[in-house]
């Protein structure tokens, strides 16, 4: 060390360390190599007036980390050739603050650098510049060694995992619950529908996991777990490096496949919500947060949907036309008001999109898809009873409203929100059953320009 300059390396007392090598006494560039838990840390200090040459610091095998004050803000000094000759990677993030801030000129520079030699297939350490240090113009930097298993951030919201559901057991439980249900043609449809929902929710609670992923690693599978165990149990450093390289290459391959699958699955024809969600994840665009009371949204909806109630004469006329319409036969020769058939229910379920949000009854479309044949038969008879009695459960008349902010609109105004109405899934199934019977009668009468947004319609 010189009289005016020097360096020191502090190691925690709980860590095992050993001094590997240090710079000669007459060397212009001072450095000190310490082995800490298998990592070689080379602390470097180059005085301001000294010259830095590519051979000033020897090359150490990986895993090694070169950190220190290189005083590279001078014009005559260059560090381009030294990292290239020793196969080193510079740890630098242009978005971070400057590592040195001079109060005399009120500017920031980066004389404190970090280089690593963690191998070609390994991840580089993370470097982050911290805040100002008391009585010093240097800002401390935090270097975090790379981790093979990096958990991803997950929202603290519990959700049902349909991919991990036991649908065979779900089907058996729903069929067993039919014996405890009331007759589908009962006059108390509210109680019958409540028991129907409770049977589905009980089977879903038993067969569908519900929670959130606390330690989720993207693209992690059993093969990656095998490589990770080999890496953790390897007695020799070469075997651990080989296992780490295999793990990194496998994760990179799975992430590439996931990327191609995500990009190729962008389709606006079926579900624009899923397509926009994928685009927002790829572009890093996040949703805007806003704070508007529910009462202000409700008052805006009342003003927007305000209309006069029809008089009793018009209501009587509509009921008469409805009764006449129910007597018109379909093109297949059936009556509109005849009971629904099981094949009609199956066709309506095929037209129902999976992955949709439920209504107030918390019944997802997947619950009806994977229900047993006995429960589906009971549900079909229940819909027939509703049409015969001209009654539906009260919860079907209530929609859950979700307010979404419009783009380029002020977030504080209720008029800047677009409302989405979430209806109960069984009610949607009844709508599709009625639509399948009414559409063949109404569709030939409508003008072609009115059928532009219908299924298969052309303007």
Image (tube, grey):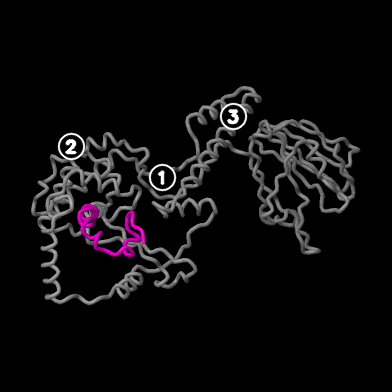
Q: In terms of secondary structure, where does tag 3 sit?
A: helix
The range drawn in magenta is 431-459
Q: Residue at x 43, y 43 (%)?
A: 213
Eye-nearest disc, 1 or 2: 2
Question: Picture coordinates of residue 44 (x, y %)?
Answer: 79, 42
In the image, 380 versus 112, the foreground residue is 380
Tags 2 and 3 in contact by the CB under 8 Å rule? Answer: no
The tag earlier along the polypeptide, 2 or 3, is: 2
Within the image, what quadrant is residue 341 found in?
top left
Q: Residue at x 45, y 52 (%)?
A: 275
Q: CA distance from mark 1 to mark 3?
A: 29 Å
Q: CA distance from mark 1 to mark 2?
A: 30 Å
* Left or right: 248 in relation to 63: left
- Name, please, the residue furthest toward the right: 26
Magenta stretch containing residue 444, yes or no?
yes
Give the labeled residue for mark 3.
246
- Checking the image for residue 212, the label placed there is 1
Question: Picture coordinates of residue 224 (x, y %)?
Answer: 52, 31
């Amino acid at each position: 060390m010189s009289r005016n300059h020097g360096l020191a390396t502090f190691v925690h007392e709980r860590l095992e360390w050993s001094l590997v090598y240090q710079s000669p006494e007459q060397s212009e560039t001072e450095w000190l190599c310490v082995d800490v838990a298998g990592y070689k840390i080379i602390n470097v200090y180059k005085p301001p007036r000294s010259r830095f040459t590519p051979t000033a610091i020897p090359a150490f095998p990986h895993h090694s980390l070169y950190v220190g004050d290189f005083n590279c803000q001078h014009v005559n000094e260059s560090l381009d050739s030294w990292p290239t000759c020793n196969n080193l990677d510079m740890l630098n993030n242009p978005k971070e603050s400057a590592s040195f801030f001079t109060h005399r000129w009120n500017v920031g520079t980066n004389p404190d650098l970090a280089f690593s030699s963690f191998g070609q297939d390994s991840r580089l350490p993370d470097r982050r510049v911290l805040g100002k240090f008391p009585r010093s113009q240097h800002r401390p930097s935090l270097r975090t060694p790379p981790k093979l298993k990096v958990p991803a951030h997950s929202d603290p919201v519990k959700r049902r995992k349909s991919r991990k559901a036991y649908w065979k057991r779900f089907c058996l439980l729903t069929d067993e619950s039919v014996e405890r249900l009331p007759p589908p043609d009962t006059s108390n449809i509210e109680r019958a529908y409540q028991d129907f929902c409770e049977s589905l929710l009980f089977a879903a609670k038993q067969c569908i996991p519900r929670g959130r992923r606390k330690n989720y690693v993207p693209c992690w599978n059993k093969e990656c777990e095998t490589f990770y165990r080999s890496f953790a149990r390897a007695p020799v450093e070469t075997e651990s490096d080989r296992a780490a390289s295999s793990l990194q290459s496998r994760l990179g391959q799975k992430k590439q496949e996931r990327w191609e699958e995500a990009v190729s699955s962008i389709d606006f024809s079926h579900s624009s919500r899923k397509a926009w969600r994928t685009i927002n994840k790829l572009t890093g665009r996040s949703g805007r947060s806003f704070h508007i009371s529910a009462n202000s949204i409700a008052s805006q909806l009342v003003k927007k949907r305000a209309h006069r109630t029809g008089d009793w004469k018009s209501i009587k006329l509509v009921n008469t036309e409805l009764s006449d319409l129910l007597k018109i036969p379909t093109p297949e020769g059936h009556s509109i008001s005849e009971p629904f058939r099981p094949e009609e229910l199956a066709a309506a379920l095929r037209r129902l999109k999976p992955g949709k949000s439920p209504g107030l009854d918390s019944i997802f479309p997947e619950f009806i898809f994977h229900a047993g044949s006995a429960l589906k038969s009971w549900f079909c008879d229940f819909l027939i009873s509703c049409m015969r009695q001209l009654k539906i459960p009260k919860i079907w008349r209530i929609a859950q409203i979700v307010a979404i902010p419009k783009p380029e609109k002020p977030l504080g105004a209720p008029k800047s929100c677009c409302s989405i109405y979430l209806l109960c899934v069984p009610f949607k199934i009844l709508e599709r059953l009625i639509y399948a019977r009414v559409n063949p009668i109404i569709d030939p009468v409508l003008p072609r320009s009115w059928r532009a947004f219908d299924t298969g319609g052309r303007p």
